[in-house]
Image (spheres, rainbow, N blue to C red):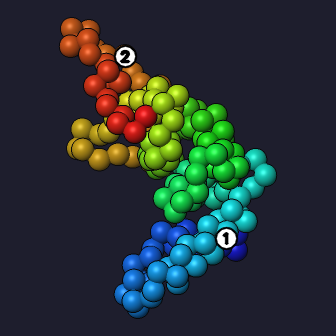
């Protein structure tokens, strides 16, 4: 449980700079806070490229790596490379709505064209999991259901324009 709290605290440090801005720090203070947050997250990454959060490793790994990428860590950095490897291999079989959503955000942020098909597949699964009411449950289909007979014949993935991929 302590590990979970540490990860969330690290994410809060990296993702919530608004409180720092409210105190009017100078640029050096902001850069130092970002460096500390980046080092904190890198220090909590597991050897297999993941961050741990009770059964949501795809989601938390995507979120932590997204925070790193948003704060200047480049895709060739080992932390991002290892996270990418894990997310690419694990997201296709993941059915958790939040995990899938975060994987899409992370993969899109990295912007590797080779992820385009995976991003589209995950997006199609996310869309297929939407309820008639417009919301979602906690799980999405493991595969996208086939289009009904007599449909337009246009797949969701052919309409996706993943601009960063």
Badge 1 local density, few (<14 within 10 Å), some, or many (20+)?
some
Q: Mark 2 points at which residue?
A: 146
In the structure shown, which secondary structural element does the residue marked by tag 2 occupy?
loop
Labelled disc at residue 40? 1
- Using the image as rendered, state which of residue 6 and residue 81 is in the foreground: 81
Badge 2 local density, few (<14 within 10 Å), some, or many (20+)?
few
Marks 1, 2: nearer the viewer: 1
Question: Which of the two labelled residues, at mark 1 and mark 2, occupies the earlier sequence position?
Answer: 1
Labelled disc at residue 64? none
Quadrant assignment, res 88: top right
Can residue 126 be seen here?
no
Quarter of the figure that contains the C terminus: top left
In the rendered view, would you say 55 is above or below 24? above
In the rendered view, would you say 7 is above or below 98? below
Percent from the top left, x then y, of residue 32?
58, 79
Q: Along the horizontal axis of the image, is 128 left or right of 51? A: left
Instruction: Tell me the residue at 66%/39% (across/down).
Output: 85
């Amino acid at each position: 449980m302590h590990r979970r709290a540490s990860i969330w605290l690290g994410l809060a440090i990296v993702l919530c700079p608004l409180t720092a801005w409210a105190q009017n720090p100078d640029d050096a203070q902001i850069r130092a806070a970002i460096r500390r947050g980046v080092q904190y997250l890198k220090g909590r990454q597991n050897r297999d490229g993941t961050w741990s959060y009770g059964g949501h490793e795809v989601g938390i790994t995507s979120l932590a790596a997204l925070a790193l990428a948003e704060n200047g860590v480049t895709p060739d950095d080992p932390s991002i490379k290892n996270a990418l490897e894990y997310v690419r291999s694990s997201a296709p079989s993941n059915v958790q709505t939040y995990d899938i959503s975060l994987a899409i955000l992370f993969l899109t942020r990295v912007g590797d064209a080779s992820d385009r098909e995976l991003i589209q597949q995950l997006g199609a699964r996310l869309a297929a999991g939407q309820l008639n009411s417009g919301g979602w449950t906690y799980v999405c289909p493991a595969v996208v259901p086939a289009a009904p007979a007599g449909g337009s014949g246009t797949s969701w993935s052919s309409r996706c324009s993943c601009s960063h991929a």
